[in-house]
Image (cartoon, helix red, strand yellow):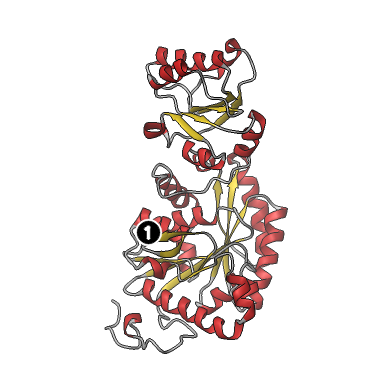
C-alpha cells in the first residue's frame, strides 16, 4: 500500500518554487531501458515490457524523460513514444509528465549559451515528472533516447538521467555475438562511470534458427562483462513490415484508390513491375507491393483482373511511378476493386530503394502489432530474474 499523501511524497503538493535534484519517490521499482544505437528496437521492447509488467504489477507508470521526436498534443510538444504508450495502454497519468523534456531544432544552441541556468530547471522538470507518473503506481518503466551518451551535449545523457532517477538499466542491442558484446561493453563503460548499474541485456532481431547459437556464445561473452542475458527476441516479420500509409508518407505519394479500407495493409514483399503482364501474374499474391510506371496499362489490368477473379484484393497494393497518372478508364476500373493504389513522382528504382531503406516504427494505429510485441516479451524475456535484480 502507498503511504498517505503528504507534502514530502505527493508530487502535486511539492512547493512550486523548489528545484528538485532527485525524485522524492525512492520506493517505487523502476528500470531504465536504453539501446546501444538508434533503431535497435528499444521502443518495441518497452511496449512489450510494459504490457508484460502489467500482468505482474496492477499499476505501471511510464516516462520518456528526454525526447527528440515529438507530436503536438493539447498544444504541447510531447515525445511521440509517450503519445504511443498513452494511446495503446491508457497509462492514466498526465501525458506532459510522460514527456517532460523535448528537444526541438534550436534547443541545443539555446542550452549551450546558458547551461548553468537551464540545467537545474531541466533536471527539476524530469524529477517532478517522474514523481507524477510514479504516484500511486507499483512500477515505473523509463525509456531512454538512443545509446548511453545521447544527450551529453546538453548534460542529459542517458547515463546522467538514469543516475538522476536512481534507476538501474537494461540495454537493448541487435543480435549476434561480437557486435552486441562490443557495443554493450562500450555503453556499460559510460553507465559505470555515472555509477549506474546495468542489470541485464536483451538481444533483438535474431533469426529463429540462430537463437540457441547466439544464446550460448553471447551469453558467455556478456557474463565476462558482468551483464546477465535477460532474453533473446526473434525476428517477427510483422514488426518490420510497413503499412501502405507509412509508405505513402515516406515516398510523398498521392492516393488514387483504396485509402479508406486498405491503408493499413502490410507489405511483406516489393516487386518492380518491369516484366510483361504475363510475367507479373506469379507475383499477384497477398502482401506483395508492385511498383511500376503509371503508363503500364497491361500490369494495371492484370492486377484488376486478378482481384476480380479472387473476389477481392490479391496484392498489398500498386505504386504507379514517374508521375504518370493511369488512363481515366483504368481509374474507374480500379475504383471497382479494393486494390490500394498510390501515385509517386520518382521512378521505380528510386521509389523501391526508399521503401527498402525505411525504418519501420510502431505507431498508435498499429493495433495488429501490439499483441505480437507483448507476447514476444512474455515468451522470451526472463521477467522474474529482471524483477529480482531490482
Relative to residue 368, is residue 121 depicted above or below?
A: below
Which residue corresponds to the image point at 35% horizontal and 70% vertical from the top-left? 138
Q: Residue furthest front?
A: 328
- The number of numbered discs placed on residues in the rendered structure image is 1
Instruction: Give x and y (percent) for residue 40.
Output: 59, 53
Relative to residue 65, is residue 260 depicted above or below?
A: above
Q: Nearer the viewer, residue 119 or 128?
A: 119
Relative to residue 244, is residue 186 depicted above or below?
A: below
Which residue corresponds to the image point at 64% horizontal and 16% vertical from the top-left? 275
Instruction: Give x and y (percent) for residue 318.
Output: 51, 26
- Is any part of residue 27 visible from this angle? yes
Q: Residue furthest left?
A: 4
At label 1, counting other C-alpha atoms closer than 10 Å, the crowd grade (few under 14, some 14-19, many 20 or more) is some
Q: Is residue 285 left or right of residue 365?
A: right
Q: Nearer the viewer, residue 357 or 379?
A: 357
Q: Nearer the viewer, residue 145 or 334?
A: 334
- Is any part of residue 237 visible from this angle? no
Query: On the rendered image, what quadrant is the N terminus found in?
Result: bottom left
Instruction: Give x and y (percent) for residue 197.
Output: 58, 73
- Element carrying mark 1: helix
Query: Which residue position holds label 1?
Result: 86
- Asked where in the image residue 240 lies, by quadrant, the reply is top right
Amino acid at each position: 500500500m502507498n503511504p498517505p499523501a503528504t507534502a514530502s511524497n505527493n508530487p502535486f503538493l511539492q512547493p512550486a518554487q523548489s528545484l528538485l535534484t532527485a525524485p522524492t519517490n525512492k520506493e517505487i521499482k523502476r528500470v531504465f531501458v536504453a539501446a546501444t544505437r538508434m533503431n535497435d528496437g528499444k521502443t518495441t521492447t518497452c511496449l512489450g515490457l510494459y504490457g508484460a509488467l502489467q500482468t505482474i504489477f496492477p499499476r505501471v507508470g511510464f516516462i520518456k524523460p528526454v525526447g527528440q521526436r515529438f507530436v503536438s498534443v493539447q498544444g504541447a510538444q510531447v515525445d511521440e513514444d509517450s503519445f504511443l504508450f498513452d494511446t495503446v495502454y491508457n497509462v492514466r497519468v498526465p501525458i506532459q509528465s510522460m514527456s517532460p523534456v523535448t528537444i526541438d531544432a534550436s534547443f541545443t544552441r539555446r542550452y549551450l549559451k546558458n547551461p548553468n541556468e537551464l540545467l537545474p530547471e531541466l533536471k527539476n522538470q524530469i524529477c517532478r515528472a517522474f514523481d507524477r507518473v510514479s504516484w500511486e503506481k507499483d512500477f515505473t518503466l523509463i525509456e531512454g533516447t538512443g545509446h548511453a551518451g545521447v544527450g551529453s551535449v546538453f548534460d542529459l545523457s542517458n547515463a546522467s538521467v538514469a543516475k538522476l532517477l536512481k534507476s538501474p538499466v537494461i540495454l537493448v542491442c541487435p543480435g549476434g555475438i561480437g557486435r552486441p558484446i562490443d557495443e554493450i561493453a562500450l555503453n556499460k563503460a559510460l553507465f559505470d562511470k555515472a555509477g549506474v548499474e546495468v542489470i541485464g541485456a536483451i538481444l533483438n532481431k535474431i533469426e529463429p534458427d540462430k537463437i540457441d547459437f547466439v544464446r550460448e556464445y553471447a551469453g558467455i561473452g556478456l557474463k565476462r562483462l558482468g551483464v546477465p542475458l535477460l532474453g533473446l527476441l526473434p525476428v517477427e516479420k510483422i514488426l518490420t513490415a510497413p503499412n501502405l500509409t507509412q509508405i505513402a508518407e515516406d515516398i510523398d505519394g498521392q492516393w488514387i484508390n483504396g485509402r479508406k479500407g486498405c491503408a493499413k495493409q502490410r507489405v511483406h514483399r516489393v516487386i518492380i513491375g518491369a516484366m510483361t503482364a504475363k510475367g507479373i501474374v506469379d507475383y499477384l499474391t497477398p502482401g506483395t507491393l508492385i511498383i511500376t510506371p503509371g503508363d503500364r496499362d497491361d500490369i494495371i489490368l492484370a492486377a484488376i483482373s486478378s482481384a476480380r477473379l479472387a473476389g477481392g484484393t490479391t496484392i498489398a497494393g500498386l505504386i504507379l511511378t514517374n508521375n504518370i497518372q493511369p488512363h481515366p478508364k483504368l481509374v474507374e476500373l480500379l475504383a471497382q476493386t479494393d486494390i490500394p493504389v498510390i501515385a509517386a513522382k520518382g521512378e521505380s528504382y528510386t521509389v523501391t530503394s526508399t521503401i527498402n531503406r525505411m525504418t519501420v516504427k510502431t505507431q498508435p494505429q498499429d493495433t495488429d502489432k501490439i499483441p505480437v510485441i507483448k507476447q514476444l516479451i512474455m515468451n522470451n524475456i526472463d521477467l522474474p530474474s529482471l524483477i529480482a535484480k531490482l
